Amino acid sequence: MASNGSSLPLSNGPPRDTVAVNRADEVDDLLKAVQSLIIPFVSSADQAGPAEPKHHEGTPRTTLVEYHKPDELVRLMNFELPGDGKGKEGLLATVEQVLKYSVNTWDQGFMDKLYATTNALHVYQVSPALTVIEKTTCRTLAKAFGFAGPYAGGISTQGGSASNTTSIIIARNNLYPSSKTTGNGTHNFVLFTSAHGHYSLEKAAQMCGLGTNNVWSVPVDAQGQMVPSSLEELILKAKAENRTPFYVNATAGTTVLGSFDPFTAISAICKKHNLWLHIDGSWGGPVIFSQKQKHKLQGAELADSFAINPHKMMGVPVTCSFLLGKDMRTFHTANTLPAAYLFHASSTDEEVWDLADLTLQCGRRGDSLKLALAWIYYGSSGFEAQIDHAFGMASYFASLLEKNVNFVLVSENPPPCLQVCFYYAPGGVLRDIKEENSTITSSIVERLVGKGFMVDYAPGEKGAFFRVVVNSQTRSETIDRLVGDIEEIGSGL
């Protein structure tokens, strides 16, 4: 984990850098502390014998598990995500609690399901503590986005692409229930996404049998935001062609320019035409933690589903991704299938505790624990400080380029998200031939590796431009050095 120090950007001049430089010591300390808890957990399974189970508060306790029913375990764990970080002490206390209430799959007595060590997350019985943590983490995240209803929540996924794919299945199976058993049938389904949306929508269309030709691209404005009037025109066009429009993918933080679509206006159109609104916030979703930046998500609470990847802007280890929703009953309706050899929960249960019954997968890793531990360590306020620092660095970077005659800024200033897009153009003049601009950009990017920098580029109307992404650990002197190295390399081309 990165340092829980914060940096507050100043309005004039370079931001004040307080990003800790002793990150290796911090990580070393935390790894050793966590290891000191995990090794005895494994060792206890090695040393376990055929002794009678001990009793803990009237509950049988063996090396394998101290078992509790879901409601009782929720009470015992009393798991919450804090506003202010609890640091190392809070993180270790949570790890101890997870181990205490988890199934020790290293134990010889574990002969359940189709795997051996370590915990997978599909049914409550084999992963009780991780199930409670995932449900709590998802509910807390969903509430932050304004999904405050009694059935709001989410699931962890393998990444943003998986979240987007899952949202399409949920939308189709809920809006057109027969598709769950008969497939697309006579429907010629069409879904809509921003012209600057992520390529995973086309990939998902292939996987779902919709075909990429049925992913319709919605034009964007000069800021890279979806144009609502164009969306409605395309919906009407699809209906006139006897197609079935059913799904709109809006974006919070596009991949290239970092743009946020106008969610309120898009939601009104979706409601008018009975379309599912999904927001791909894989990149920009975490701005919800920042009082300065969260206005960019205005209207997000109107969506039917929302994807977010804490492993991006929030620095949580890969993979850590979630699909959130305002009504988890729609997730269950779309994905549940009878599997009596796996799911044994009562049909009268108000909560779905076997999480695989909400997802496209069966067994999954306990990735929600990564966000939970980071949240406990930093707190919401720590996330906010890190995000505000990163946005301060992006603004500083854009301002530096805007003042330099050798660069042409593509991004807005300040940029809407954490990527800064620009051309290297001596004297502020780009070449007339776009291929020449692309060659200059790609050549500099290649040579920057030898200077200790790895950045990317993207296609533009005037050729490929630089796309440099800052993060919560970026320092102003790093940006200064990058700009100087680009100028040095560029002058020698």
Image: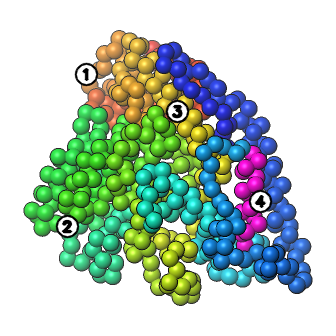
Q: In 3D space, how far apart are the residues under numbered discs 4 and 1 (Cα atoms)? A: 63 Å
Looking at the rendered structure, the secondary structure element under dot 4 is: helix
Q: Provide the residue span drawn in magenta.
A: 88-103
Q: Is residue 359 above or below residue 279?
A: below
| Residue found farthest to the left | 240
| Residue bearing mark 2 | 244
Q: Quadrant of the C terminus?
A: top left
The residue to which callout 1 is attached is 432
Q: Position of residue 51 (x, y in %)?
A: 90, 83
Please tell me which of labels 1 and 2 falls first in the chain. Answer: 2
Q: Residues within 10 Å of mark 4 (few under 14, many from 20)?
A: some
Q: Amino acid at mark 2?
A: Thr
State the separation of the CA atoms marked 3 and 4: 32 Å
Q: Which mark is residue 388?
A: 3
Helix, strand or loop under label 3? helix
Residue 179 falls in which quadrant of the image?
Answer: bottom left
